Amino acid sequence: MSQNKWTGQDIQHILLAVFITLFFTVRKGPIDEVIIIMAKHLWAYAIYSIATVLIIVGLTKKMFKYEVTFRQMVRWAAYFAAFCAVSQFFHEAFQALVQSGK
């Protein structure tokens, strides 16, 4: 089987990562403000995850002598975006908890 062929498992992993990213990006408040905030967060997660994956692959590919496919990089970027969304959500929750004095 070719390493560039997309499998059902690849698509499931990416869809799950996208769902997690969207779930942890949702905020409460007026709908017009929420949409703008969500769009900014999603844009930041996308740019940050893609750039980080490209940097890591660029720095380690020659050193560890491995071949990376576009499919693998897309999966890694989706996972990283989900990680960033969850981290940001918990950061904001903790910050709100500290500011409330509890």
Image: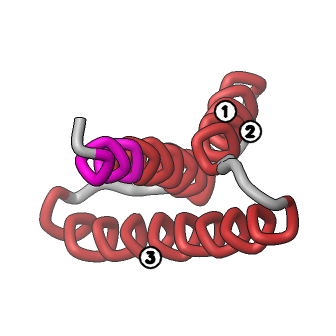
Labelled pair 1, 3 in contact (Cβ < 8 Å): no
Residue 29 in the image: x percent, y percent?
73, 55
Which residue occupies the foreground of this view, 1 or 13?
Answer: 13
Q: Is residue 45 or residue 70 the one in the foreground? A: 45
Q: Residues within 10 Å of mark 1 (few under 14, many from 20)?
A: some
The image quadrant that residue 59 belongs to is bottom left
Residues marked 2 and 1 touching at CB (< 8 Å):
yes
Give coordinates of residue 75: x percent, y percent. 56, 46
Label 2 Cα crowd, 10 Å radius (few <14 / some 14-19 / many 20+): few
Residue beneath disc 2? 6
Give the percent coordinates (x, y) of residue 19: 70, 36
For label 2, the SS is: loop
Residue at 62 percent across and 50 percent down: it is 25
Query: Rounded to the nearest whole Å, what is the CA distance between mark 1 and mark 3?
Result: 21 Å
Which mark, residue 10?
Answer: 1
The residue that label 3 is drawn on is: 51
Q: Amino acid at mark 3?
A: Ala
User: Which sits earlier in the primary sequence, circle 2 or circle 3?
Assistant: 2
Q: Quadrant of residue 39?
A: bottom right
Q: Which residues are magenta?
A: 92-100
Q: Is residue 56 above or below residue 85?
A: below
Please determine whether, in this image, residue 88 is positioned above or below residue 54: above
Residue placed furthest toward the front:
101
